[in-house]
């Protein structure tokens, strides 16, 4: 067990990812219930299945990355768990199968429509794992690569919302698409934020966005993704009469991001690069708490 504890610390830190995924899944369930106008909090089982199912999906993405990047890791990043022999790809594959079985076991009692949403996520996940059979073409087009991979985010969120409306025996509520769009944009925020590096942090064979685009463009793209997330979140919040609160909270956070981005642009220190990654997590947590959970708290 010790080596698996080390693996999760290095590649899938539960204490860091857990709260974000909990906010992500709980917000999806709560927002769906708000759209339905149910007038009462969602069922506990909806929150549980959404969280475990979403956690499993993100873990599957990490496992897929281990397979996809195995050759590059062995060449450029021998310190990672797989190339240094801490765990094997065969063991990770077995865990992946177990995670998928658990997801299916949780979705089945909720209803066949939720199984269908899980199936859509699996199909897209499988295509991502094979780089859509166009790895070289995608690698040469970083923006297309980024967008194609971040489309998994709204699919996972779609499954999480289904844990509410499928369990309630209703169809997908109108207006859900803006919430899913906010999820897509926020996925880009996270991906850009974790691959903006100070010059001293750049590694051979690691295509960060500061390496690919240069520091000014990478930071500008991150700020644009934050702004796009804010816009989609505002449109989603309008559907539940919570737009002013969302715009004020996220607007203030965006100004903080602007200050951080400008500081990194002037002085690209490692601490500021790490700050951008951390700020992306804070933004994510605030987005989902504000958009899905805060309306219930303020009404109660």
Image (cartoon, rainbow, N blue to C red):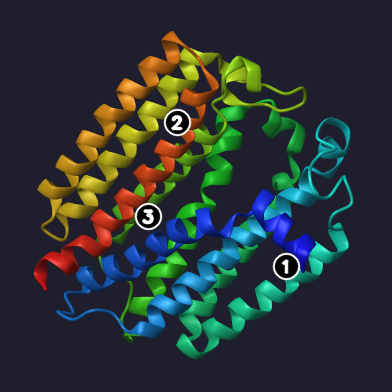
Label 2 secondary element: helix
Quarter of the image with the C terminus in it = bottom left
Residue farthest toward the top in the current orientation of the protein: 266
What residue is drawn where x is 32% and y is 36%?
228
- Answer left or right for 87 relative to 156: right
Q: Position of residue 192 (x, y in %)?
A: 51, 33
- Residue 96: which disc? 1
Q: Position of residue 286 (x, y in %)?
A: 30, 49
Quarter of the image with the N terminus in it = bottom right
What residue sits right under mark 3 in the picture?
180
Label 3 secondary element: helix
Q: Position of residue 117 (x, y in %)?
A: 50, 71
Camera-side mark, 2 or 1: 2
Vertical placement of residue 57 versus 196, above or below: below
What residue is drawn where x is 43% and y is 61%?
157
Residue farthest toward the bottom in the current orientation of the protein: 109
Judge by depth and name the residue closer to the eye, 5 or 43. Answer: 5
What residue is drawn where x is 28% and y is 69%?
30
Vertical placement of residue 234 versus 218, above or below: below
Judge by depth and name the residue closer to the eye, 273 or 169. Answer: 273
> CB under 8 Å between callouts 3 and 1?
no
- Residue 277: which disc? none
What residue sits right under mark 2 in the picture?
276
| Sequence-first disc among 3 and 1 | 1
Q: Whole-Å distance between the Cαs marked 2 and 1?
A: 31 Å
Camera-side mark, 3 or 1: 1
- Answer left or right for 135 relative to 289: right
Q: Whole-Å distance between the Cαs marked 3 and 1?
A: 25 Å
Vertical placement of residue 254 versus 91, above or below: above
């Amino acid at each position: 067990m010790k080596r698996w504890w080390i693996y999760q610390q290095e590649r899938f830190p539960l204490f860091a990812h857990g709260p974000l995924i909990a906010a992500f899944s709980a917000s999806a369930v709560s927002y769906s219930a708000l759209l339905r106008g149910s007038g009462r909090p969602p069922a506990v089982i909806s929150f549980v299945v959404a969280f475990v199912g979403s956690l499993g999906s993100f873990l599957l993405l990490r496992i897929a990355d281990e397979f996809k990047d195995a050759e590059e890791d062995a060449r450029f990043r021998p310190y990672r768990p797989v190339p240094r022999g801490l765990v094997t790809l065969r063991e990770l594959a077995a865990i992946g199968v177990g995670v998928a079985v658990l997801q299916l076991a949780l979705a089945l009692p909720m209803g066949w429509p939720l199984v269908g949403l899980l199936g859509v996520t699996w199909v897209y996940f499988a295509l991502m794992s094979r780089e859509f059979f166009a790895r070289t073409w995608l690698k040469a087009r970083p923006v297309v690569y980024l967008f194609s991979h971040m489309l998994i985010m709204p699919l996972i969120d779609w499954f999480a919302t289904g844990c509410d409306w499928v369990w309630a025996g209703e169809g997908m509520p109108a207006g859900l698409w803006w919430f899913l769009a906010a999820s897509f944009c926020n996925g880009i925020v996270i991906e850009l934020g974790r691959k903006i590096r100070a010059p001293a942090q750049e590694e051979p064979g690691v295509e960060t966005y500061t390496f690919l685009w240069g520091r000014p463009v990478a930071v500008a793209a991150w700020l644009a993704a934050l702004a796009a997330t804010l816009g989609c979140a505002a449109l989603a919040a309008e559907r539940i009469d919570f737009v002013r609160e969302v715009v004020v909270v996220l607007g203030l956070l965006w100004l903080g991001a602007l200050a951080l981005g400008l500081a990194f642009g002037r002085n690209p220190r490692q601490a500021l690069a790490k700050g951008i990654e951390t700020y992306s997590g804070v933004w994510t947590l605030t987005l989902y708490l504000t958009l899905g959970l805060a309306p219930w708290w303020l009404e109660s």
